[in-house]
Image (cartoon, rainbow, N blue to C red):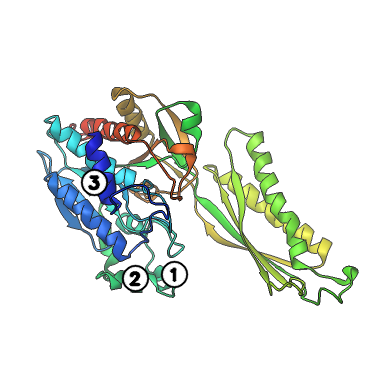
Amino acid sequence: MKDWLEENLKRLNLVESMEQPGGFTRLGYTKSETEAIRVFEKVATELGLTLQYDTAGNAIARWGGSIPDLPAVAVGSHLDTVASGGGYDGVAGVLCGLGAVKFLQDAGFKPTCPIEVICFRSEESSRFGISTIGSKAMAGLLDLEIGSIKDSEGTTIQEAVENIGLDWSQFPKAERSRQEIKSFVELHIEQGTILEESGKDFGVVQGIACPIRLKVQTVGQAGHTGTTPMNRRKDALVAVAPLISFVSETARELSEAGEVPVVATVGTIEAKPNVMTVIPGVVEVGIDIRSVSDSLKNQVAERIRHKCEELEKLFQVKFSVSTLVHNPSVLLDPGVQKKLAKACEDAGFTGMRMNSGAGHDVMNMAAKWPSGLIFIPCKAGLSHHPDEYATVDDLKMGMEILASYLRQESGCNE
């Protein structure tokens, strides 16, 4: 199976070697993503699975059970990447799902209910700033109004999907009923170092820390850097500077005070007019706040608002805080977590319960069906980077864990 995994890892990544200094770039709803999905179709067909595409472009490979009308046990992930990203984020879940089917077929297993391996479209937000478009459509969570959002080249989401032969107006028809799917599980590289540092083989994820994202705008007064006295300045950048360290310190303080961590990051900053000889008149910063605890996220956001009020008075500038994203965090199904832990142990591996600081397709599927998420280690926690790496042994482990889960889930009629 190791040879099969290595060969098909490269096939799904459209390369002959995983050594790619420039990384992998398969943005959502592009020809390169489509090409990778066509390879998924080929591999699935080689396994004797039937293929269908929904109106959002998601690919569904199905292994019919002895009672084909039963709800399907589904696994899957995505094949798109960030720009110059790695070859394991998303791909590992698709590969291990297909590998689990092969593993069970080779063992002579016959499922009672159908098994599906789903390859979602456009999971990453790298192109449009909107993530998990394919799984949103499948779960009935897609808002068609996002179709007007543009990428860096000015192409809207609607134009992008229509350029590859899809119809944006038909995306809502990709929604599936509750009766079609029994459960959904995604396997993913951890994108962190908790597993590596703990020495555990795998992680069963309890919750996904969806973000609050804020935009803070500070308006001062632009002026000549050489002629404006220091006591007459309304420097927007000077005023916002204390906020940057405040955000980090607040998240650290709250994390150390409780059992559930929270993280907060000032990830973007734009100063205007951004000229060496002009005092910054307007500054905008973007803040990302994440925790599986919604109350902790709200605490950080509220403290940021209060800090902005203080800074506004201190520096005689105008602060405004707007909320870009406020998504409640997702707690995954306890029953599926228990079954995944048993599947892992049955396969001979040791694991731990943990949370995810990054979003995944499973968070949309969890809104409608019992869902779970498994992490396998990735080297040094590096992800969204050309050096992203998971060993073939860990891929094989992930495949065996999924196979164990599929065996128990698709062989019963609960």
Earlier sequence position, callout 1 versus callout 2? 1
Quarter location, residue 405: top left
> Residue 101's spot in the image, x, y percent?
19, 38
Marks 3, 1: nearer the viewer: 1
Earlier sequence position, callout 3 versus callout 2? 3
The residue to which callout 1 is attached is 151
In the image, residue 326 sits, relative to residue 256, either above or below, namely below
Name the amino acid, label 2.
Ala
Earlier sequence position, callout 3 versus callout 1? 3
> Residue 103's spot in the image, x, y percent?
19, 34
Name the amino acid, label 1.
Asp
The residue to which callout 2 is attached is 160
Relative placement, left or right, of 414 versus 363 is left
| SS of the residue under disc 3 | strand
- Callout 3 touching callout 1 (CB < 8 Å): no
Res. 253 visible in picture:
yes
Q: Residue 242 carries which label?
A: none
Q: Residue 117 carries which label?
A: 3
Quarter location, residue 116: top left
- Report how far apart the C-alphas of labels 3 and 2 lie in the structure: 25 Å
Q: Quadrant of the C terminus?
A: top left
Name the amino acid, label 3.
Val
- Callout 1 touching callout 2 (CB < 8 Å): yes
Quarter location, residue 217: bottom right
Q: Residue at x 58, y 61 (%)?
A: 323
Q: Residue at x 41, y 53 (%)?
A: 23
- Report how far apart the C-alphas of labels 3 and 1 lie in the structure: 29 Å
Q: Which residue is drawn at 25% across and 54% down?
A: 176
> Residue 287's spot in the image, x, y percent?
61, 56
In the image, residue 271 sits, relative to residue 353, either above or below, namely below
| SS of the residue under disc 2 | helix
> Residue 177's spot in the image, x, y percent?
25, 53
